[in-house]
């Protein structure tokens, strides 16, 4: 129900050139009109009109659709987006307005910026002051990330990921290269070869040291006008990075700044990772270069960077609600609570009070959560915020076993919320009925809601649970199939279907659902129980032995005994029906 509201999510921190109003769109993405689609590596970027300002554009970044059913890609993408969200507001790091799910696919919401360093490099080497600005602002970004989150690694630092705005440079795509590495490890991305550190060619993971090497290659290219090496095949690139030294041309006569930056680049291009300076050292050295060689120009660079820092800090304060909501959407409840705990009490807005309650509730601190919800409800909330707050409040009441109070709130909300919010309220009310042992009421609540909203998998999934509680198993299986028709990537629903299918004696369908769940990364304890029971019922002794060995390898003897007892009970239930 909650999602980032674009508005002007970046405040005055970024003054970007306007898009021509009324530009022709090529498609629709949720509430956005698509102006352009850019693809590269594993990602897709949709350049879209801002729903609140047709003259400006936003960029929505995600992984390519072919990876939608790839659990490693989805999980890696979400994990790395979490890192990027937490870096929002740091100077010279691309700001993120939040995360939005469109048709169950996650999209990072950020400003649309057309120019990268690659565009500048295509015109040849940069002047001394431009090189100094590039070197300083990129190093500041990398140092700021390290200070905020510790040993944070970018993993794909290259000119295409350093964007150019009138306010200064912005480092983008923090950590997203690991989505590629984890989802398709054999994929070779040629755009990274020129900046890949020697150790990474022989299997070492990306690190701060490899980021430093990439930084050195970028600075070399900025000064010289070409990359340190120019090869074609991976083998030749690997040999060059591991054993060759880049040519050392002389900078233009009289350009002492570029000469110093080239020296610094060679230090970063050291073959041994231990010989490369840290980003903090680079920032300090670059300040010294400014002071000694161009005090006036250096002061301008420092002033511009300071102005961006101040503007971004203000932007971060304004973006905290979307940041926290995005972390909650990513199931990063502790991180969301930590962000909220850092907000001074006098700065707690209506929405932040409600989000504090959400974070506490989701970390199983419902008693305290209720106090924050009640504080928020004492405020003069707008209608949408009041509905969200009451709904979250009712969920905490449910978790505390106060079912009647929760049901009363949801029944009240059904008569108040707009039509597009009704499925959300009906679904939450049904979960209260299910937990309080009232499956008939859950069916009554969900049956019409699910038919009116056939693309809402949560409604069908809960309807299936209600039928399963009533032992109406064929109806439960039908509801789960409807849920999967809307969300085929949901391995958790595949497991619900598998259990019902087993109880019905439909072992072949159960086996298909169990395999589909496994393909989606759901190799949980529940999966292991169902897989063993199904294999036993199908007489697959070899597979049963493999599953038993797997359980004994990773579980304690007591856990194995408990799991085997559950398997036996399920098998006997099926055989006795």
Image: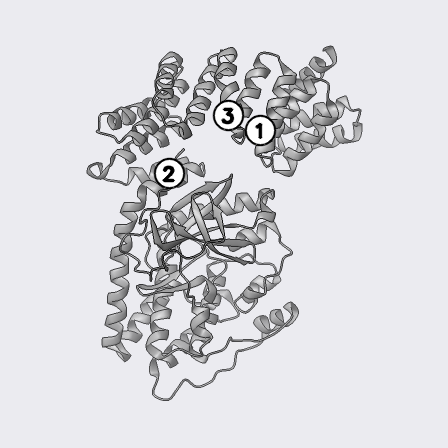
Task: Please name the residue shown 34% across and 23% down the image.
Answer: 416
Cα distance between the residues tagged 2 and 1: 25 Å
Residue 577 seen in the figure: yes
Apparent side of residue 248 relative to residue 384 in the rendered image (left or right): right
Residue at the image position 48 percent from the left and 67 percent from the top: 213
Q: Residue at x 50, y 14 (%)?
A: 444
Q: Which mark is residue 483?
A: 1
Residue at mark 3: 452
- Residue 325 image label: 2
Earlier in the chain: of badge 1 and badge 3, it is 3
Residue 227 at x, y percent in the picture: 51, 75
Residue 266 visible to an observer of this rendering: no
Q: Position of residue 8 (x, y in %)?
A: 31, 49
**The residue positioned farthest toward the bottom in the image shown:** 253
Cα separation, mark 2 vs mark 3, equals 28 Å
The x, y position of residue 37, in whole percent, is 50, 56
Q: Residue furthest left?
A: 346
Looking at the rendered image, the disc whose residue lies closer to the viewer, 1 or 3, is: 3
N-terminal of the two: label 2 or label 3?
Answer: 2
């Amino acid at each position: 129900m909650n999602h980032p509201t674009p508005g002007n999510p970046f405040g005055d921190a970024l003054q970007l050139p306007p898009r021509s109003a009324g530009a022709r769109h090529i498609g629709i993405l949720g509430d956005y009109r698509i102006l352009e689609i850019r693809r590269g590596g594993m990602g897709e970027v949709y350049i879209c009109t801002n729903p609140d300002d047709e003259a400006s554009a936003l960029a929505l970044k995600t992984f390519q659709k072919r990876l939608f059913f790839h659990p490693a890609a989805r999980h890696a993408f979400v994990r790395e987006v979490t890192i990027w969200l937490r870096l929002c507001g740091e100077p010279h790091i691309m700001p993120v307005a939040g995360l939005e799910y469109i048709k169950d696919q996650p999209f990072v919401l950020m400003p649309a910026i057309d120019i990268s360093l690659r565009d500048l490099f295509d015109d040849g080497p940069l002047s001394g002051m431009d090189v100094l600005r590039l070197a300083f602002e990129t190093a500041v970004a990398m140092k700021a990330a390290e200070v905020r989150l510790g040993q944070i690694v970018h993993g794909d630092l290259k000119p295409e990921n350093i964007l150019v705005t009138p306010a200064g440079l912005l480092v983008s795509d923090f950590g997203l290269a690991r989505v590629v590495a984890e989802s398709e490890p054999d994929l070779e991305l040629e755009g990274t070869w020129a900046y890949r550190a020697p150790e990474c060619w022989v299997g070492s993971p990306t690190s701060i040291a490899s980021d430093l090497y990439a930084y050195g290659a970028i600075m070399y290219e900025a000064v010289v006008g070409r990359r340190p090496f120019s090869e074609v095949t991976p083998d030749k690139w690997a040999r060059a990075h591991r054993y060759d030294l880049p040519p050392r041309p002389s900078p233009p006569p009289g350009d002492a700044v570029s000469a110093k930056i080239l020296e610094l680049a060679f230090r970063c291009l050291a073959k041994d990772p231990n010989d490369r300076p840290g980003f903090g050292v680079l920032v300090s050295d670059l300040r010294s270069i400014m002071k000694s060689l161009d005090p006036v120009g250096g002061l301008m660079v420092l002033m511009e960077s300071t102005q961006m820092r101040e503007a971004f800090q203000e932007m971060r304060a304004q973006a905290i609600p979307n940041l926290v909501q995005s972390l909650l959407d990513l199931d990063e409840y502790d991180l969301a609570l930590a962000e909220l705990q850092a907000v001074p009490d006098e700065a707690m807005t209506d929405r932040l009070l409600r989000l504090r309650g959400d974070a506490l509730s989701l970390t199983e601190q419902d008693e305290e959560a209720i106090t924050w919800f009640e504080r928020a409800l004492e405020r003069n909330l707008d209608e949408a915020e009041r509905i969200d707050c009451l709904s979250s409040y009712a969920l905490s009441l449910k978790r505390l076993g106060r079912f009647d109070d929760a049901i009363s709130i949801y029944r009240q909300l059904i008569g108040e919320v707009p039509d597009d919010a009704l499925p959300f309220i009906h679904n939450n009310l049904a979960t209260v009925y299910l937990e309080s042992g009232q499956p008939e009421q859950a069916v009554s609540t969900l049956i019409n809601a699910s038919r009116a909203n056939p693309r809402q998998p949560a409604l069908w999934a809960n309807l299936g649970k209600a039928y399963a509680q009533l032992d109406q198993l064929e109806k439960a299986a039908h509801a789960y199939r409807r849920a999967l028709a809307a969300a085929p990537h949901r391995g958790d629903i595949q497991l619900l279907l598998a259990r019902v299918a087993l109880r019905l004696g439909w072992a072949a369908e159960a086996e298909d659902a169990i395999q589909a769940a496994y393909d989606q990364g759901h190799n949980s304890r529940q999966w292991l129980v169902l897989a063993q029971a199904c294999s036993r019922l199908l007489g697959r002794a070899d597979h049963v032995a493999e599953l038993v060995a797997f359980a004994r390898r990773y579980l304690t003897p007591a856990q194995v005994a408990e799991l085997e007892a559950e398997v036996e009970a399920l098998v006997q239930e099926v055989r006795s029906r």
